Image: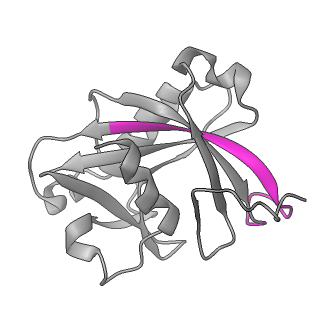
Amino acid sequence: MESNITDYISKDGDGNVFISFEQIDEDKITSKCSPLTHCLAVVRMNGDYLLGWNKWRRRYEVFGGCMEENETPRECIIRECCEELGIIDGDFVYLGVMKFLLAPDYFSSKERIEYGALYGITLPDGSPDEIYSRVKDKAEIKKIALYKEVKGKETIADIDGKLFDYYR
């Protein structure tokens, strides 16, 4: 299919390609980007980025997940951050839309193009342990750390590191 893409932002070790990032109005993304399947959040705290250790992918990642039926992107990111960070309210900043070429995985046996909405949020200064104590989905998120604490020591999703560029 499109695995011959040569112009892209980043690739990861799983064969996924971060193709592009576009600034599309938040209220127009569901009509302009199909399929819009997920939302991600770049989270800042203590002047650094916060990451969660994903049990199934065995690496640190930004937070977020798949959209549920009849859910808006904003509703999705609020729900996901409530589950994965224990955030019950916050000032989520819509940043834009990511376009990916995704490799076959447990969602599909085929390579495919998908879109995702990207948000940013800055949390008050605190400790990752304090945040982890509020995590609701401890089956998926096994620990939380600041980027500077794990960079070069732990596995971090390559594409996720590029997402930091969109929320400085």
Which residue occupies 37% across, 52% down? 164
Q: Is residue 127 left or right of residue 155?
A: left
Please, which residue is most extreme toward the front here? 7
Picture quadrant of residue 146: bottom left
Q: Is residue 132 left or right of residue 20?
A: left
Q: Quadrant of the N terminus?
A: bottom right
The residue range painted magenta reads 104-120
Q: Please tell me whether residue 114 belongs to the stretch shown in magenta.
A: yes
Residue 146 in view (yes/no): no
Q: Is residue 96 above or below residue 24?
A: below
Q: Is residue 30 above or below residue 130?
A: above
Count of marks, rendered view: 0
Which residue occupies 66% across, 61% down? 17
Estimate the x, y position of residue 77 in percent, counting from the top left: 46, 36
Please, which residue is most extreme toward the right here? 1
Please, which residue is most extreme toward the top here? 27
Q: Please tell me whether residue 42 belongs to the stretch shown in magenta.
A: no
Q: Is residue 18 left or right of residue 26?
A: right
Q: Is residue 65 left or right of residue 109?
A: left
Q: Quadrant of the C terminus?
A: top left
Which residue occupies 34% across, 29% down? 92
Which residue occupies 72% across, 45% down? 114
Estimate the x, y position of residue 97 in percent, counting from the top left: 57, 35
Estimate the x, y position of residue 140 in percent, counting from the top left: 46, 63
Residue 36 in view (yes/no): yes
In this view, the residue in front, 161 or 109, is 161
In this view, the residue in front, 94 or 84, is 94
What colour scheme governs how the chains and residues are painted in the rendered image of this protein?
one colour
